[in-house]
Amino acid sequence: MHQETANSDVKLKRVLTLSDLVIYGIILIQPCAAMPLFGHANQEAQGHAVVSVLLAMSAMLMTAISYGRMANRYPAAGSAYTYVGRGLDPRLGFLTGFSVYLDYLIIPIICTIFCGSAANQMMPFIPTQMWYLLFSGMFIWLNLRGIKTTSRFSWILMIVMSIVVFWYMGAAIQHLFGMGGSAVLFTTEPFYHSSSFSLKVIFQGTALAALTYIGFDGLTTLGEEVENPRRNVMLATVMTCLITGIWSGAQIYLAQAAVPWSNWEGFIGDIMTRAGVTDQSEGLNRAMFGIAKVVGGAPLEFAITLVLLVASVGSGVTGLTGCVRVMYGMGRDRMLPEKFFGHLDPKHSVPSYNILLIGAIVLVAPFFLDYGQCAHLINFGALLAFSLVNIASIREYYFKAERRTLGSFFKNFLPPAVGVVACLSIWSNLPRLTFIIGGTWLLLGFIYLLIRTKGFRQPIVMQDVF
Protein backbone atom coordinates (compact mmCIF):
# COMPACT_ATOMS: atom_id res chain seq x y z
CA MET A 1 0.00 0.00 0.00
CA HIS A 2 1.24 3.46 -0.83
CA GLN A 3 2.54 5.32 2.21
CA GLU A 4 0.37 8.25 3.30
CA THR A 5 1.57 11.79 2.81
CA ALA A 6 3.61 13.46 5.51
CA ASN A 7 0.53 15.01 7.15
CA SER A 8 -2.19 12.58 6.05
CA ASP A 9 -4.65 13.86 8.68
CA VAL A 10 -4.86 17.17 6.81
CA LYS A 11 -6.92 17.15 3.63
CA LEU A 12 -7.93 19.64 0.99
CA LYS A 13 -11.43 20.85 1.90
CA ARG A 14 -14.40 20.54 -0.44
CA VAL A 15 -15.84 24.01 0.13
CA LEU A 16 -16.26 25.44 -3.38
CA THR A 17 -19.65 25.54 -5.10
CA LEU A 18 -20.26 25.44 -8.85
CA SER A 19 -20.64 29.23 -8.93
CA ASP A 20 -17.38 29.65 -6.98
CA LEU A 21 -15.61 27.49 -9.53
CA VAL A 22 -17.04 29.34 -12.54
CA ILE A 23 -16.07 32.71 -11.04
CA TYR A 24 -12.58 31.37 -10.29
CA GLY A 25 -12.21 30.25 -13.92
CA ILE A 26 -13.47 33.52 -15.36
CA ILE A 27 -11.16 35.53 -13.10
CA LEU A 28 -8.21 33.34 -14.07
CA ILE A 29 -8.92 33.94 -17.77
CA GLN A 30 -10.00 37.56 -17.07
CA PRO A 31 -13.48 38.87 -18.03
CA CYS A 32 -11.74 41.50 -20.17
CA ALA A 33 -9.06 39.18 -21.58
CA ALA A 34 -9.95 40.06 -25.17
CA MET A 35 -9.45 43.78 -24.62
CA PRO A 36 -5.62 43.89 -24.61
CA LEU A 37 -5.60 41.55 -27.62
CA PHE A 38 -8.22 43.44 -29.60
CA GLY A 39 -5.92 45.69 -31.63
CA HIS A 40 -3.59 42.89 -32.73
CA ALA A 41 -6.43 40.39 -33.32
CA ASN A 42 -8.38 42.87 -35.45
CA GLN A 43 -5.26 43.67 -37.46
CA GLU A 44 -4.48 39.98 -38.03
CA ALA A 45 -8.09 39.17 -38.95
CA GLN A 46 -8.42 42.27 -41.14
CA GLY A 47 -11.50 43.58 -39.35
CA HIS A 48 -13.00 40.21 -38.33
CA ALA A 49 -11.78 39.97 -34.72
CA VAL A 50 -15.19 38.95 -33.38
CA VAL A 51 -15.30 36.02 -35.83
CA SER A 52 -11.86 34.93 -34.63
CA VAL A 53 -12.91 35.15 -30.98
CA LEU A 54 -15.98 32.99 -31.60
CA LEU A 55 -14.05 30.43 -33.68
CA ALA A 56 -11.45 30.19 -30.93
CA MET A 57 -14.27 29.65 -28.43
CA SER A 58 -15.53 26.71 -30.47
CA ALA A 59 -12.08 25.11 -30.46
CA MET A 60 -11.53 25.72 -26.74
CA LEU A 61 -14.98 24.34 -25.90
CA MET A 62 -13.90 20.97 -27.30
CA THR A 63 -10.90 21.01 -24.99
CA ALA A 64 -13.00 22.22 -22.05
CA ILE A 65 -15.31 19.23 -22.53
CA SER A 66 -12.30 16.90 -22.43
CA TYR A 67 -11.02 18.52 -19.23
CA GLY A 68 -14.45 18.28 -17.67
CA ARG A 69 -14.93 14.62 -18.61
CA MET A 70 -11.48 13.68 -17.30
CA ALA A 71 -12.24 15.58 -14.08
CA ASN A 72 -15.46 13.57 -13.83
CA ARG A 73 -13.44 10.36 -14.05
CA TYR A 74 -10.52 11.55 -11.87
CA PRO A 75 -11.65 14.38 -9.54
CA ALA A 76 -8.22 15.01 -7.99
CA ALA A 77 -5.76 17.90 -7.75
CA GLY A 78 -3.18 18.00 -10.50
CA SER A 79 -5.29 18.82 -13.58
CA ALA A 80 -3.50 17.82 -16.82
CA TYR A 81 -0.86 15.92 -14.85
CA THR A 82 -3.54 13.68 -13.35
CA TYR A 83 -5.66 13.32 -16.49
CA VAL A 84 -2.82 12.40 -18.86
CA GLY A 85 -1.13 10.26 -16.22
CA ARG A 86 -4.33 8.29 -15.59
CA GLY A 87 -5.65 8.32 -19.13
CA LEU A 88 -2.41 7.60 -21.01
CA ASP A 89 0.72 6.93 -18.96
CA PRO A 90 2.04 8.24 -15.59
CA ARG A 91 5.39 9.17 -17.14
CA LEU A 92 3.72 11.16 -19.89
CA GLY A 93 1.51 12.63 -17.19
CA PHE A 94 4.57 13.90 -15.35
CA LEU A 95 5.96 15.54 -18.50
CA THR A 96 2.53 17.08 -19.16
CA GLY A 97 2.39 18.38 -15.61
CA PHE A 98 5.93 19.70 -15.98
CA SER A 99 4.90 21.45 -19.21
CA VAL A 100 1.68 22.98 -17.86
CA TYR A 101 3.53 23.92 -14.70
CA LEU A 102 5.53 26.36 -16.86
CA ASP A 103 2.21 27.89 -17.93
CA TYR A 104 0.91 28.22 -14.36
CA LEU A 105 4.25 29.56 -13.14
CA ILE A 106 4.40 32.26 -15.82
CA ILE A 107 0.83 33.52 -15.20
CA PRO A 108 1.52 35.13 -11.77
CA ILE A 109 4.91 36.37 -13.04
CA ILE A 110 3.44 38.10 -16.09
CA CYS A 111 0.65 39.53 -13.94
CA THR A 112 3.20 40.92 -11.47
CA ILE A 113 5.10 42.56 -14.35
CA PHE A 114 1.95 44.10 -15.85
CA CYS A 115 0.55 45.22 -12.50
CA GLY A 116 3.86 46.84 -11.53
CA SER A 117 4.12 48.74 -14.80
CA ALA A 118 0.47 49.83 -14.83
CA ALA A 119 0.55 50.94 -11.19
CA ASN A 120 3.76 52.89 -11.82
CA GLN A 121 2.08 54.73 -14.70
CA MET A 122 -0.78 55.73 -12.39
CA MET A 123 1.48 56.56 -9.41
CA PRO A 124 4.97 57.18 -10.83
CA PHE A 125 6.33 58.41 -7.51
CA ILE A 126 6.45 54.75 -6.39
CA PRO A 127 9.16 52.75 -8.26
CA THR A 128 8.03 49.84 -10.42
CA GLN A 129 10.25 47.49 -8.38
CA MET A 130 8.33 48.36 -5.23
CA TRP A 131 5.09 47.54 -6.99
CA TYR A 132 6.54 44.15 -7.98
CA LEU A 133 7.15 43.38 -4.31
CA LEU A 134 3.71 44.63 -3.28
CA PHE A 135 1.72 42.64 -5.84
CA SER A 136 3.71 39.41 -5.53
CA GLY A 137 3.36 39.68 -1.74
CA MET A 138 -0.41 40.09 -2.14
CA PHE A 139 -0.61 36.97 -4.33
CA ILE A 140 1.30 34.96 -1.72
CA TRP A 141 -0.69 36.24 1.29
CA LEU A 142 -4.11 35.58 -0.27
CA ASN A 143 -3.12 32.03 -1.21
CA LEU A 144 -1.78 31.31 2.28
CA ARG A 145 -5.13 32.37 3.75
CA GLY A 146 -6.87 29.39 2.11
CA ILE A 147 -8.94 28.63 -0.94
CA LYS A 148 -12.13 30.17 0.49
CA THR A 149 -10.37 33.52 0.95
CA THR A 150 -9.09 33.28 -2.62
CA SER A 151 -12.64 32.52 -3.78
CA ARG A 152 -14.12 35.51 -1.91
CA PHE A 153 -11.43 37.76 -3.38
CA SER A 154 -12.32 36.44 -6.85
CA TRP A 155 -15.98 37.37 -6.32
CA ILE A 156 -14.98 40.95 -5.39
CA LEU A 157 -12.77 41.28 -8.46
CA MET A 158 -15.54 39.85 -10.64
CA ILE A 159 -17.97 42.52 -9.43
CA VAL A 160 -15.50 45.37 -10.02
CA MET A 161 -14.58 44.18 -13.52
CA SER A 162 -18.20 43.51 -14.44
CA ILE A 163 -19.21 47.08 -13.53
CA VAL A 164 -16.55 48.60 -15.80
CA VAL A 165 -17.12 46.16 -18.68
CA PHE A 166 -20.88 46.81 -18.60
CA TRP A 167 -20.17 50.55 -18.43
CA TYR A 168 -18.08 50.21 -21.58
CA MET A 169 -20.75 48.13 -23.32
CA GLY A 170 -23.53 50.53 -22.30
CA ALA A 171 -21.51 53.53 -23.48
CA ALA A 172 -20.74 51.79 -26.77
CA ILE A 173 -24.41 50.96 -27.38
CA GLN A 174 -25.42 54.56 -26.60
CA HIS A 175 -22.68 55.88 -28.88
CA LEU A 176 -23.74 53.63 -31.76
CA PHE A 177 -27.39 54.59 -31.39
CA GLY A 178 -26.33 58.22 -31.47
CA MET A 179 -24.45 57.62 -34.71
CA GLY A 180 -27.41 56.17 -36.58
CA GLY A 181 -29.77 54.14 -34.43
CA SER A 182 -30.31 50.38 -34.68
CA ALA A 183 -28.91 50.22 -38.22
CA VAL A 184 -25.47 51.15 -36.86
CA LEU A 185 -25.77 49.04 -33.70
CA PHE A 186 -26.88 45.88 -35.50
CA THR A 187 -24.47 45.50 -38.40
CA THR A 188 -22.92 42.53 -40.18
CA GLU A 189 -19.66 44.35 -40.95
CA PRO A 190 -17.74 42.92 -37.93
CA PHE A 191 -18.63 39.43 -39.20
CA TYR A 192 -18.06 40.02 -42.91
CA HIS A 193 -16.17 42.81 -44.63
CA SER A 194 -16.09 42.03 -48.34
CA SER A 195 -12.84 43.88 -49.10
CA SER A 196 -10.76 41.99 -46.54
CA PHE A 197 -12.52 38.67 -45.84
CA SER A 198 -10.54 35.46 -46.41
CA LEU A 199 -10.11 32.20 -44.53
CA LYS A 200 -6.38 32.86 -44.19
CA VAL A 201 -6.81 36.10 -42.26
CA ILE A 202 -9.61 34.62 -40.16
CA PHE A 203 -7.38 31.74 -39.04
CA GLN A 204 -4.50 34.13 -38.39
CA GLY A 205 -6.76 36.08 -36.09
CA THR A 206 -8.06 32.91 -34.45
CA ALA A 207 -4.53 31.79 -33.55
CA LEU A 208 -4.13 35.02 -31.59
CA ALA A 209 -7.70 35.20 -30.27
CA ALA A 210 -7.27 31.77 -28.67
CA LEU A 211 -5.13 33.53 -26.07
CA THR A 212 -8.39 34.94 -24.70
CA TYR A 213 -9.18 31.50 -23.23
CA ILE A 214 -5.75 30.40 -22.01
CA GLY A 215 -6.02 29.51 -18.33
CA PHE A 216 -9.53 28.00 -18.16
CA ASP A 217 -7.97 24.65 -17.27
CA GLY A 218 -6.70 26.14 -14.01
CA LEU A 219 -10.05 25.53 -12.34
CA THR A 220 -9.59 21.76 -12.71
CA THR A 221 -6.62 21.95 -10.31
CA LEU A 222 -9.25 22.46 -7.57
CA GLY A 223 -10.85 19.06 -8.14
CA GLU A 224 -10.39 18.05 -4.48
CA GLU A 225 -11.81 21.31 -3.12
CA VAL A 226 -15.12 21.32 -5.00
CA GLU A 227 -18.49 20.10 -3.83
CA ASN A 228 -19.71 17.25 -6.08
CA PRO A 229 -16.62 17.44 -8.33
CA ARG A 230 -17.74 14.81 -10.84
CA ARG A 231 -20.60 17.10 -11.85
CA ASN A 232 -19.38 20.60 -11.04
CA VAL A 233 -15.91 20.55 -12.61
CA MET A 234 -17.34 19.39 -15.92
CA LEU A 235 -20.03 22.08 -15.90
CA ALA A 236 -17.65 24.79 -14.73
CA THR A 237 -15.05 24.23 -17.46
CA VAL A 238 -17.63 24.38 -20.24
CA MET A 239 -19.52 27.32 -18.68
CA THR A 240 -16.30 29.27 -18.18
CA CYS A 241 -15.32 28.97 -21.85
CA LEU A 242 -18.85 29.67 -23.07
CA ILE A 243 -19.38 32.73 -20.84
CA THR A 244 -15.93 34.10 -21.66
CA GLY A 245 -16.49 33.64 -25.40
CA ILE A 246 -19.91 35.28 -25.51
CA TRP A 247 -18.84 38.12 -23.21
CA SER A 248 -15.60 38.73 -25.10
CA GLY A 249 -17.37 38.47 -28.44
CA ALA A 250 -19.88 41.15 -27.39
CA GLN A 251 -17.08 43.49 -26.27
CA ILE A 252 -15.16 43.06 -29.53
CA TYR A 253 -18.30 43.35 -31.68
CA LEU A 254 -19.13 46.74 -30.14
CA ALA A 255 -15.54 47.91 -30.59
CA GLN A 256 -15.57 46.94 -34.28
CA ALA A 257 -18.96 48.59 -34.79
CA ALA A 258 -17.70 51.79 -33.15
CA VAL A 259 -14.60 51.88 -35.38
CA PRO A 260 -15.33 50.02 -38.65
CA TRP A 261 -12.50 48.40 -40.59
CA SER A 262 -12.71 51.15 -43.21
CA ASN A 263 -11.65 53.67 -40.51
CA TRP A 264 -9.17 51.36 -38.77
CA GLU A 265 -5.91 52.60 -40.27
CA GLY A 266 -6.70 56.23 -39.48
CA PHE A 267 -7.86 55.29 -35.97
CA ILE A 268 -4.60 53.50 -35.13
CA GLY A 269 -2.63 56.36 -36.68
CA ASP A 270 -4.41 58.87 -34.41
CA ILE A 271 -3.64 56.74 -31.35
CA MET A 272 0.05 56.60 -32.29
CA THR A 273 0.16 60.36 -32.83
CA ARG A 274 -1.46 61.13 -29.45
CA ALA A 275 0.83 58.67 -27.66
CA GLY A 276 3.92 59.93 -29.47
CA VAL A 277 4.95 56.47 -30.71
CA THR A 278 6.06 55.33 -34.16
CA ASP A 279 5.75 51.55 -33.68
CA GLN A 280 2.40 50.30 -34.97
CA SER A 281 2.50 47.51 -32.38
CA GLU A 282 2.31 50.14 -29.65
CA GLY A 283 -0.72 51.66 -31.34
CA LEU A 284 -2.41 48.26 -31.54
CA ASN A 285 -1.66 47.68 -27.84
CA ARG A 286 -3.66 50.83 -27.04
CA ALA A 287 -6.55 50.14 -29.42
CA MET A 288 -9.12 49.28 -26.76
CA PHE A 289 -8.19 52.32 -24.69
CA GLY A 290 -8.83 54.38 -27.82
CA ILE A 291 -12.19 52.68 -28.34
CA ALA A 292 -13.12 53.45 -24.72
CA LYS A 293 -12.28 57.12 -25.26
CA VAL A 294 -14.35 57.24 -28.46
CA VAL A 295 -17.50 55.80 -26.84
CA GLY A 296 -17.17 57.09 -23.26
CA GLY A 297 -14.53 59.81 -23.04
CA ALA A 298 -11.53 60.10 -20.75
CA PRO A 299 -13.30 58.71 -17.62
CA LEU A 300 -14.07 55.41 -19.35
CA GLU A 301 -10.58 55.28 -20.85
CA PHE A 302 -9.13 55.57 -17.31
CA ALA A 303 -11.57 53.00 -15.96
CA ILE A 304 -10.63 50.47 -18.65
CA THR A 305 -6.95 50.99 -17.83
CA LEU A 306 -7.72 50.45 -14.15
CA VAL A 307 -9.86 47.37 -14.73
CA LEU A 308 -7.09 45.69 -16.75
CA LEU A 309 -4.85 46.26 -13.76
CA VAL A 310 -7.48 44.72 -11.46
CA ALA A 311 -7.95 41.81 -13.86
CA SER A 312 -4.23 41.06 -13.77
CA VAL A 313 -4.33 41.03 -9.97
CA GLY A 314 -7.10 38.42 -10.12
CA SER A 315 -5.19 36.30 -12.63
CA GLY A 316 -2.04 36.55 -10.53
CA VAL A 317 -3.80 35.26 -7.42
CA THR A 318 -5.64 32.42 -9.17
CA GLY A 319 -2.62 31.55 -11.33
CA LEU A 320 -0.51 31.02 -8.22
CA THR A 321 -3.33 28.91 -6.76
CA GLY A 322 -3.29 26.55 -9.76
CA CYS A 323 0.50 26.37 -9.92
CA VAL A 324 0.96 25.20 -6.34
CA ARG A 325 -1.75 22.54 -6.67
CA VAL A 326 -0.06 20.96 -9.66
CA MET A 327 3.07 20.72 -7.51
CA TYR A 328 1.01 19.31 -4.63
CA GLY A 329 -0.39 16.56 -6.90
CA MET A 330 3.13 15.62 -8.00
CA GLY A 331 4.46 15.75 -4.45
CA ARG A 332 1.71 13.51 -3.12
CA ASP A 333 2.57 10.97 -5.82
CA ARG A 334 6.25 11.24 -4.83
CA MET A 335 7.27 12.55 -8.24
CA LEU A 336 8.63 15.50 -6.26
CA PRO A 337 9.94 15.24 -2.67
CA GLU A 338 6.81 14.36 -0.72
CA LYS A 339 7.55 15.95 2.64
CA PHE A 340 7.92 19.37 1.06
CA PHE A 341 5.66 19.40 -2.01
CA GLY A 342 2.98 17.09 -0.54
CA HIS A 343 2.68 19.15 2.64
CA LEU A 344 -0.60 20.83 3.65
CA ASP A 345 -0.87 23.59 6.22
CA PRO A 346 -2.92 22.22 9.19
CA LYS A 347 -4.82 25.49 9.73
CA HIS A 348 -5.82 26.54 6.21
CA SER A 349 -5.46 23.20 4.35
CA VAL A 350 -3.30 24.71 1.60
CA PRO A 351 0.08 23.58 0.18
CA SER A 352 1.88 26.32 2.12
CA TYR A 353 5.45 25.25 1.33
CA ASN A 354 4.64 25.29 -2.38
CA ILE A 355 3.04 28.72 -2.06
CA LEU A 356 6.13 30.14 -0.39
CA LEU A 357 8.48 28.55 -2.92
CA ILE A 358 6.57 29.67 -6.00
CA GLY A 359 5.85 33.00 -4.36
CA ALA A 360 9.59 33.59 -3.99
CA ILE A 361 10.09 32.86 -7.72
CA VAL A 362 7.23 35.19 -8.63
CA LEU A 363 8.76 37.88 -6.46
CA VAL A 364 12.21 37.65 -8.07
CA ALA A 365 11.42 36.81 -11.73
CA PRO A 366 10.01 40.24 -12.78
CA PHE A 367 13.43 41.75 -12.17
CA PHE A 368 14.91 39.51 -14.91
CA LEU A 369 12.09 38.77 -17.41
CA ASP A 370 9.94 41.01 -19.60
CA TYR A 371 6.27 40.81 -20.52
CA GLY A 372 6.80 39.63 -24.11
CA GLN A 373 9.03 36.70 -23.16
CA CYS A 374 6.50 35.51 -20.60
CA ALA A 375 3.49 35.87 -22.93
CA HIS A 376 4.85 33.42 -25.51
CA LEU A 377 5.90 30.87 -22.88
CA ILE A 378 2.38 30.71 -21.46
CA ASN A 379 1.07 29.27 -24.72
CA PHE A 380 3.78 26.64 -25.09
CA GLY A 381 2.89 24.69 -21.97
CA ALA A 382 -0.85 25.30 -22.09
CA LEU A 383 -1.51 24.27 -25.69
CA LEU A 384 0.68 21.18 -25.42
CA ALA A 385 -1.19 20.10 -22.29
CA PHE A 386 -4.56 20.82 -23.96
CA SER A 387 -3.64 18.50 -26.84
CA LEU A 388 -2.59 15.66 -24.55
CA VAL A 389 -5.69 15.93 -22.36
CA ASN A 390 -7.84 15.68 -25.50
CA ILE A 391 -5.94 12.53 -26.52
CA ALA A 392 -6.37 11.11 -23.00
CA SER A 393 -10.12 11.77 -23.21
CA ILE A 394 -10.33 9.90 -26.54
CA ARG A 395 -8.56 6.87 -25.07
CA GLU A 396 -10.53 6.93 -21.81
CA TYR A 397 -14.02 7.35 -23.27
CA TYR A 398 -13.74 5.91 -26.78
CA PHE A 399 -11.03 3.27 -27.07
CA LYS A 400 -11.59 1.87 -23.56
CA ALA A 401 -15.34 1.59 -24.10
CA GLU A 402 -16.86 -1.88 -24.37
CA ARG A 403 -18.73 -0.88 -27.53
CA ARG A 404 -17.76 1.75 -30.09
CA THR A 405 -20.86 2.89 -31.95
CA LEU A 406 -21.49 5.71 -34.41
CA GLY A 407 -23.05 7.71 -31.58
CA SER A 408 -19.98 7.12 -29.46
CA PHE A 409 -17.78 8.36 -32.32
CA PHE A 410 -19.62 11.69 -32.46
CA LYS A 411 -19.76 12.01 -28.67
CA ASN A 412 -16.48 10.57 -27.43
CA PHE A 413 -14.06 10.76 -30.36
CA LEU A 414 -14.86 13.69 -32.65
CA PRO A 415 -15.01 16.60 -30.12
CA PRO A 416 -11.63 15.89 -28.47
CA ALA A 417 -10.11 15.09 -31.89
CA VAL A 418 -11.15 18.54 -33.10
CA GLY A 419 -9.61 19.93 -29.94
CA VAL A 420 -6.31 18.19 -30.65
CA VAL A 421 -6.13 19.55 -34.20
CA ALA A 422 -7.05 23.08 -33.13
CA CYS A 423 -4.57 23.22 -30.25
CA LEU A 424 -1.68 21.74 -32.20
CA SER A 425 -2.34 24.13 -35.10
CA ILE A 426 -2.04 27.13 -32.79
CA TRP A 427 0.91 25.62 -30.91
CA SER A 428 2.86 24.99 -34.12
CA ASN A 429 2.74 28.69 -35.00
CA LEU A 430 4.53 29.88 -31.86
CA PRO A 431 7.86 31.73 -32.35
CA ARG A 432 11.05 29.70 -32.68
CA LEU A 433 12.54 31.17 -29.47
CA THR A 434 9.52 29.92 -27.54
CA PHE A 435 10.17 26.38 -28.78
CA ILE A 436 13.82 26.66 -27.77
CA ILE A 437 13.01 27.79 -24.22
CA GLY A 438 9.99 25.52 -23.83
CA GLY A 439 11.83 22.57 -25.35
CA THR A 440 14.73 23.09 -22.95
CA TRP A 441 12.28 23.14 -20.05
CA LEU A 442 10.75 19.84 -21.22
CA LEU A 443 14.21 18.32 -21.66
CA LEU A 444 15.02 19.17 -18.05
CA GLY A 445 11.78 17.48 -17.00
CA PHE A 446 12.64 14.40 -19.05
CA ILE A 447 16.11 14.17 -17.47
CA TYR A 448 14.60 14.51 -13.99
CA LEU A 449 12.04 11.81 -14.80
CA LEU A 450 14.78 9.52 -16.13
CA ILE A 451 16.73 9.89 -12.89
CA ARG A 452 13.65 9.70 -10.66
CA THR A 453 12.45 6.41 -12.22
CA LYS A 454 15.98 4.95 -12.54
CA GLY A 455 15.86 4.78 -16.30
CA PHE A 456 12.08 4.16 -16.38
CA ARG A 457 12.54 0.88 -14.46
CA GLN A 458 10.79 2.17 -11.34
CA PRO A 459 7.03 2.65 -11.79
CA ILE A 460 5.16 5.84 -10.94
CA VAL A 461 2.33 5.26 -8.47
CA MET A 462 -0.47 7.84 -8.63
CA GLN A 463 -2.61 8.00 -5.48
CA ASP A 464 -6.29 7.20 -5.58
CA VAL A 465 -8.08 10.03 -3.77
CA PHE A 466 -11.44 9.87 -5.55
Image (tube, rainbow, N blue to C red):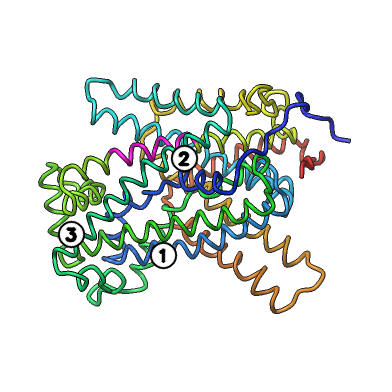
Q: Tag 3: Cα neighbours inside 10 Å, few (<14), some, or many (≥20)?
A: some
Question: Judging from the image, what secondary structure is the residue with disc 1 in?
Answer: helix
15 relative to 56 in the view: left or right: right
Mark 3 to mark 1 CA distance (whole Å): 24 Å
Which is closer to the viewer, label 3 or label 1?
3
Residue drawn where x is 70% and y is 73% of the image: 408
Dot 1 crowding, Cα within 10 Å, few <14, some 14–19, many 20+: many
Given the image, on which type of amino acid does mark 1 rest? Leu
Residue receiving disc 1: 54
- Mainly helix, strand or loop, the magenta region? helix
Q: Amino acid at mark 3?
A: His
Residue 20 drawn at (x, y percent): 55, 44
N-term-proximal mark, 3 vs 1:
1
Q: Please, which residue is most extreme toward the right here?
A: 1
Q: Which residues are magenta?
A: 306-317
Q: Quadrant of the C terminus?
A: top right
Mark carried by residue 143: none
Q: How far apart in space, not on screen, are marks 2 and 3 (Cα)?
A: 30 Å
The kind of residue tagged 2 is Trp
- Was residue 214 drawn as part of the magenta stretch in this picture? no
Mark sitting earlier along the chain (2/3): 2
Indicate the position of residue 26 as horizontal and vertical percent values: 47, 48
Return the residue nearer the eye: 236 or 47: 236
> Which residue is painted at 23% across and 30% down in the image?
122
Question: Where the N terminus falls, by quadrant?
Answer: top right
Seen from the viewer's position, the closer of residues 428 and 132 is 132
Q: CA distance from mark 2 to mark 1?
A: 26 Å
**Which residue is under mark 3?**
175
Q: Which mark is residue 155?
A: 2
Direction from residue 280 to residue 415 in the image, left or right: right
Q: Callout 3: helix, strand or loop?
A: helix
Q: Is residue 307 magenta?
A: yes
